[in-house]
Amino acid sequence: MRAAGDDQLEDLINRDVPIPLYYQICQYVRTLIDSGKIKPGEQIPTEAQLQQLFGVSRATVRRAISDLAYEGLLDRRRAKGTLVARTKLEETLYGFASFTNSVFKSKKTPQSRVLDFRVTRVDGSIADFLGIGREDDVATMKRIRYVDGEPVAVENWYAPVRHLPGIDRSFFKETGIEQSTYHMLQERYGIQLTKAVDTMSSVALDKEDAELLRRERHMPVLLRTRISYNSAGVPITYSSGRYIITLIINFEKKVHE
Amino acid sequence: MRAAGDDQLEDLINRDVPIPLYYQICQYVRTLIDSGKIKPGEQIPTEAQLQQLFGVSRATVRRAISDLAYEGLLDRRRAKGTLVARTKLEETLYGFASFTNSVFKSKKTPQSRVLDFRVTRVDGSIADFLGIGREDDVATMKRIRYVDGEPVAVENWYAPVRHLPGIDRSFFKETGIEQSTYHMLQERYGIQLTKAVDTMSSVALDKEDAELLRRERHMPVLLRTRISYNSAGVPITYSSGRYIITLIINFEKKVHE
DNA sequence: CAGTGGTCTAGACCACTAG
DNA sequence: TAGTGGTCTAGACCACTGA
């Protein structure tokens, strides 16, 4: 229902064109952000305001906002409002270097929070990757990784206890160089991991990880799995991590390879 | 409105629990797929059927289906139905190897379709990556990549014409080893690219690329950018690709690095 | 032509936050 | 308590597909 004195700029939207209204609203909000009119951390108009501004139903506004939130561009908070998301972090990890080392190199502060540690048996592909039977015990650990206090990754870590006798939750530190599992393996067991095979793909954040990373569900994140081997070529650890950040890799090829 | 003879199994859903209905439906459909009851390419129940089955409104059903489609698990087709998506392809690319070589190595058939070629000026970061001024012409090319006929990637390719005099659309082949730009640069210009820097991150497919890859909009895909250098360390090409597939990388570290 | 998913409306009640 | 986003309903019309 539009009142007579309705002077909102509905030129912003065009109902005579076969472009969905929600998509036009999407683009409008996008330009607000891209142009810098609304900056990260600031609030965009409320759903009610957008509804009025464009003269559409609330469902249509929500469809537009949802699309942008799924991309990770917006951050919705019940009872507070919808904010422009903190920029997708510019942090980077480098090739084979550990998370801890990568972050230190960029003069930021890495940090961890261990959510879970247990020794158990694992099924299926993880056992296969580690080259063990279903009856072998595996130390499993889950933690959140931070850069300068911002959560940037959720990691799951697995290692056969056969190689790590007496392993305990207290072995995993949450600050300093000691939080590196590479460091821990070196110090506690004298194990050096000199080879790794990574896989990279892309997945949507599920509910649990979205909450841990304080991001919107469905936001696309980098999924990296890594099998690390000791110098004898024996797989020692398997890990999988979901990263908000970008990973950088350097390749060098011998000529005439 | 539920009829008396309404014998649909609404035990599937629990309205007395603070779990959103759409989420419960989501989980139900997920188990149908995970358990193999409905296989890739097969159709899930229509929206109307799910509505009846659970006794909810159509909007609620659509919210559930949308969530799964955004994850890439479902493939909605207007007027036909909603299918379980073809599995996220198991294809893999290897480290520094070219797409063409990687695919050939796995005994599949790579193919390309060039959508666009032009010589133009480019703005901002691409010019920076290539180490050229804003006034330098750049050859730009966009293509779709296929493995055994399935579209798996959209690639954008850029190279300063300064290094590639007389470059023409006809230089880009669509089949065989010749579709490799590495191969083309070697054969036509004697240029060998021996070093590369990649960045990996994760983004949602936009409308255009989703159509090209015949996937759902918003599906998370791997975004890889690559700057390739000749043996003198001069950047020759910049490319960015969106990949449905997984990338594998091998790392080897000298001990005592 | 009937049936599918795509878009849109106009309501409703809720949980949570902040003043 | 007022205002936010979260969930849900019961409709509507559309474009496209396939029989």
Image (cartoon, coloured by chain):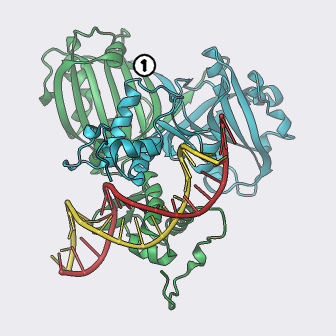
Chain colours: A green, B cyan, C yellow, D red
Return the residue nearer the eye: B132 or C8: C8
The residue located at (50%, 25%) in the rendering is B248
Q: Where is residue A72 drawn, in percent x and y? A: 43, 53
The residue located at (22%, 9%) in the rendering is A135
The residue located at (59%, 72%) in the rendering is A13
A183 left or right of A43 in image: left
Callout 1: helix, strand or loop? loop
- Residue that lies at the very extreme toward the front in this rendered image: B5
**Quarter of the image where one finds residue B94:** top right
Three-letter amino acid code at disc 1?
Lys
Q: Where is residue A224 drawn, in percent x and y? A: 41, 32
> Where is A195 relative to A40, above or below?
above
Is residue B256 at least partly visible in the picture? Answer: no
Return the residue nearer the eye: A97 or A164: A164
Quadrant in the picture for the C terminus of chain B = top left
A62 left or right of A111 in image: right
- Residue that lies at the very extreme toward the bottom in this rendered image: A5
Is residue B25 at least partly visible in the picture? Answer: yes
Q: Which residue is mark 1?
A: B254
Q: Where is residue B153 drawn, in percent x and y? A: 62, 35
Q: Where is residue B174 drawn, in percent x and y? A: 77, 29
B86 left or right of D9 in image: right
- Residue that lies at the very extreme toward the right in this rendered image: B166
Return the residue nearer the eye: B211 or A140: B211
> Where is A47 relative to B122, above or below?
below
Tell me the subunit letter for badge 1: B
